[in-house]
Image (tube, grey):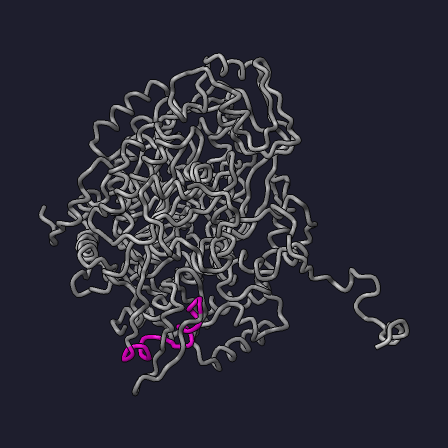
Amino acid sequence: MALKFKTPMLDELEKGPWPSFVTDVKRMAARKPACEDWLGLMEMSYEHKEGHWKHGGIVGVFGYGGGVIGRYCDRPDLFPNVAHFHTMRVNQPASKFYNTDVLRKLCDMWDRRGSGLTNMHGSTGDIILLGTTTDQLEPVFYELTHDFGMDLGGSGSNLRTPEGCVGMARCEWSCIDTQALIYDLTMEYQDALHRPMFPYKFKFKASGCACDCVAAIARADCSIIGTWRDNIRIDQEAVRAYANGELVPQAGAHGSEKYKLDIKAEVVDLCPTRCMEWDGKNLKIWDEDCTRCMHCIRVMPRALRPGLDTGATILVGAKAPILEGAQLSSVVIPFMKMEPPYEEFKGFVEKMWDLWMEEGKNRERLGELIQRMGLREFLKACELTPDPRMVNTPRFNPYIFYDPAEVPGGWERDLKDFRSRHQA
Amino acid sequence: MSEEAKARIIEWVKQQKKTKHYFNDLCKAVPEIKMMQAKKIINELVNEGRLKYWSSGSTTMYMLPGQDDVAKEEKGMN
Amino acid sequence: MAFDPNNLLQDRITDIGPPKYDTFMPPIVKENWGKWKYHEILQPGVLVHVSETGAELFSVRVGAARLISTDLIRDICEVADKYCDGYLRFTTRNNVEFLVSDKNKLQPLLNDLKSRGNWFPVGGTGHSVTNIVHTQGWAHCHTPAIDASGVVKSVMDELFDYFGSHKLPAQVRIALACCLNMCGAVHCSDIAILGVHRKPPFIEHDRVQNVCEIPLVIAACPTAAIKPKKVGEYKSVEINNNRCMFCGNCYTMCPALPLADGEGDGIALWVGGKVSNVISAPMFSKLAVPYIPNEPPRWPTTVKTIKKIVETYAAGARRYERIGDWINRIGWERFFERTGIEFKHEHIDDYRLAMTTWRTTTQFKF
């Protein structure tokens, strides 16, 4: 079927070996007028080298302050079927496992009530239903809650949809049960997720190990990263098997051919703390010097495994550059056990939120507040004790803001007494 | 007490020049109430239809119903 | 009860959250929860996870666009029904993983995927270029400087061999954000593609007072560059263009301050970031190319430059070195020399904490 608009530029994106979103949407356009107009609008953007969407201000369904992003096309005269084209964020099941029944049902619903276009998934981790009209928002929400047992995700100044890595469901390195934790936090903080109370967005992300597959350390206001504090488990026989070329190093990440792994060159010498030694027969690890970077475990996964005394390192404050510049999360709790009902962790979270809500300026991310107030104020408010693991280096400027309470006698001094010893 | 606080919040919003307000601006109308508590009161105001949300996508604000540029947009006024 | 548009509160359900995480998991995953012993990548895109119980789960990873239609999801379902008892998952980087618990179905699945044209490229594991994570671009955003889906498609077409192979020194993670608000945080990627505006917004003085609330527009500017101003009869604003950092927040609040500009907008490329703590600590991506014009539909200069960076890295890095590790070893002077990218004044930081990035040692290379 011939489409309404010619799309010579987009057609160029049908070529090449990578899957083409243009071919995909064209197929839908045969039965969805919104897709047909969307293609026309995209072609126009390609010609103008400018986007053609306006922001809407719409937030959600009744009683919710998030979950919907309002969009209006700036050429409704030409593309009436995408004049209103709002996004709905649907909270994904943690780690994004699905069966085909639920996906098909979701597709049928979205064909009926929306454009038929989606993102699987958005940057937050949500299922993104892309493009519908205002009158469909409530019916979609009704169907999601009644027929799917699903709910909207976060947007705006809400808690954003928490996200975790694949975790113990399918990874031998996961030191914490990321799914259980993420689900628990999502359920506990539903109100914050749907109804804004924060100065700005707030993200929780949990990775099971230091490889950090959900990029928690780079983008979550509160990053939860699994770790252990006992010893790496070693199977010496398997180490020797790697050395003898009986096992594929790096689990095949560098090619599936077996070769005699040079344990000194590829493991020991690349260890950032040089905490291991290989004598040709046994691998010795000085675990007290290990910083648990995962390199040796990744190269010899059949021989080395994380320890058994597992928990999480809690870091806070990561964000993209706007406004004060990008920040990575900083360690504030070097180790914490992470087991249901996560009371200690939630106690920390609530203290942190109290501080941010009270002291944070509008549109100030937690990381910026900490930068403005200092980590010391943050630690104080969250009742945490300073620890060298929280810094790369102690300060190298001498400007310490002393608290009068910590100086004997405070700052109240007797001038007369001073002058009795010193002439003016 | 919560009815009285709700009234004060609405009154405060009506007095402002701006139509859209951040959560912690609304809290200034009831300074003696803890923010977590104020959140509950503000939620009720939204549920009662006396306040509405507005979102830029990255931040969310509160406004009185009827001052809504979404409605304007959809009537082709923008 | 059916939905009643006139009575939203009737039978309303709220705050139920997502389905519990194990609702849609295959039995093999539930049975081996926390018992996985090791994994191996059998070939690019094909993983096996082996449990302490002896169970084996095969995952076949395929690349997909982030923007996908319900028809494509139905195709994915058809494949999953045939070979995976209807189970699959998506990854954080928009890949699809078909979960096979019966080894006999693995090869037939791979054959089937191969028979379906370009839809399901297998790869994205190990030392490959994995799928590009990205934002909406012209497809759905109101402040984009570039398209997202089209740039990603063009780059992945060019790097396609690296998706389905393990020939790089380490994994290369590419991410794209269509403006500097970075709703998809790209600032710690091996290669980041960032849309940049370079012209401050227009001010439509005759519209501002009708469609915008001036105090809110002023408050929206992160650098306080906007002030109220009376222009003739109109209540409007003025913008200190020297302070504008092109975020588009004012346009979000006020449609009479449009920002997009076909000639001004374009792409900046950043390199050397990572999020993992493996060997080296997480790092930010640093500026490689400040500006490349928008060149739809295939963005040839961007594509060519990225390919050059990847190939220079592939040729010069040691095994396990991410792009950032490689650059740290050879030095930035060598990076610019070897990639042929010109070093300009934009590369030298002049924002806050700029001096922490200046060279304060005589150790450098000629």
Image coords of residue C167 (percent x, y): 34, 27
Residue A232, image quadrant: top right
Does residue B52 belong to the magenta stretch?
no
Q: Residue furthest bottom?
A: C233
Q: Is residue C208 magenta?
A: yes
Instruction: Judge from the rendering whether residue A227 lies leftward or rightward of residue C207; answer left or right.
Output: right
Nearer to me, C199 or C165? C199
Residue A93 visible: no
The C terminus of chain C: image quadrant: top left
Q: Is residue A343 left or right of residue A267?
A: right
Percent of width and height locating residue C130: 35, 36
Magenta range is C205-223
Residue A151 rendering spot, x and y as whole percentages: 42, 51
Residue at x 39% of width, y 44% of height = C271
- A419 in relation to C121, above or below: below
Q: In this rendering, does residue A405 appear at all? A: yes
Q: How many marks?
A: 0
Is residue A20 positioned above or below A347 on the image?
A: above
Residue situated furthest left in the rendering: A2
Does the magenta stretch mainly form a helix, a strand or a loop?
Answer: helix
Residue A350 figure quarter: bottom right
Task: Please state which of residues C19 and C330 is positioned toward the viewer in this rendering.
Answer: C330
Question: Where does the image place residue C284, in percent across and percent down from the top left?
Answer: 46, 47
In the image, is A119 to the left or to the right of A125?
left
- Give the residue displayed 16% in from the left and 45% down from the top: A12
